[in-house]
């Protein structure tokens, strides 16, 4: 089953909150999106040009998609069917018996 972990050492959440606090106290910046004027264009080959091994590494099998769907449904149910209460990976614990999150 899913359980919340009390450990926050994995991704260092305290440093994230510190940086967001310090940035809010500095002068305000204009919100928006900007793009770099200098870009590098790289062609993307058509999927038919990839070898079987490349396709296997790049794309999920139908079994993997099914497994992920089941896991995602469990996680969503655990979070009370509310995306605002999502539990991050580093907040989860792994069951030692089953290996499940």
Image (cartoon, rainbow, N blue to C red):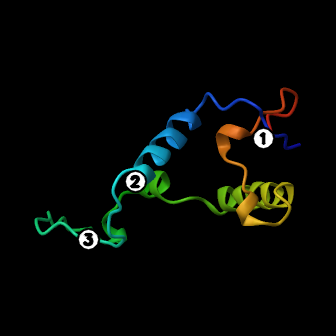
Do callouts 2 and 3 mark residues in contact (Cβ within 8 Å)? no
User: Comparing marks 3 and 1, which lies closer to the viewer?
Assistant: 3
Q: Position of residue 14 (x, y in %)?
A: 57, 35
Q: Secondary structure at mark 3?
A: loop
Q: Position of residue 35 (x, y in %)?
A: 23, 70
Q: Is residue 14 left or right of residue 84?
A: left
Considering every residue shown, the one lying at the far left of the view is 38
User: Comparing marks 2 and 3, which lies closer to the viewer?
Assistant: 3
Give the answer, above or below, for where 87 lies relative to 84.
above
Q: Callout 3: few (<14), some (14-19), or many (20+) C-alpha neighbours within 10 Å?
A: few
Identify the residue at image location x=62%, y=27%: 9
Return the disc, 3 or 1, that comes first in the chain's sequence. Answer: 3
Identify the residue at image location x=71%, y=39%: 91
Return the disc, 2 or 3, that comes first in the chain's sequence. Answer: 3
> Toward which corner of the image does residue 40 lie, by quadrant?
bottom left
Residue at image mark 2: 54
Return the disc, 1 or 2, that comes first in the chain's sequence. Answer: 2
Q: Where residue 59 is drawn, which disc sits there?
A: none
**Marks 3 and 1, how far apart in space?**
38 Å
Give the answer, above or below, for where 45 lies relative to 89.
below
> Toward which corner of the image does residue 80 lie, by quadrant?
bottom right
**Marks 1 and 2, how far apart in space?**
29 Å
Identify the residue at image location x=32%, y=69%: 30
Residue at image mark 1: 101
User: Comparing marks 1 and 2, which lies closer to the viewer?
Assistant: 1
Identify the residue at image location x=77%, y=32%: 6
Task: Pick the quarter of the image with the N terminus.
Answer: top right
Residue at image mark 3: 34
Q: Secondary structure at mark 2?
A: helix
Task: Pick the quarter of the image with the C terminus.
Answer: top right
Give the answer, above or below, for where 85 lies relative to 6.
below
């Amino acid at each position: 089953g899913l359980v919340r972990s009390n450990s926050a050492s994995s991704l260092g959440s305290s440093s994230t909150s510190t940086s967001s606090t310090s940035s809010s106290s500095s002068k305000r910046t204009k919100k928006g999106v900007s793009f770099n004027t200098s870009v590098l264009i790289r062609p993307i080959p058509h999927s038919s040009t990839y070898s079987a091994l490349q396709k296997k590494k790049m794309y999920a099998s139908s079994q993997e998609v099914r497994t992920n769907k089941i896991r995602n449904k469990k996680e969503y149910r655990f979070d009370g069917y509310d995306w605002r209460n999502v539990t991050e990976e580093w907040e989860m614990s792994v069951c030692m018996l089953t290996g499940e999150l």
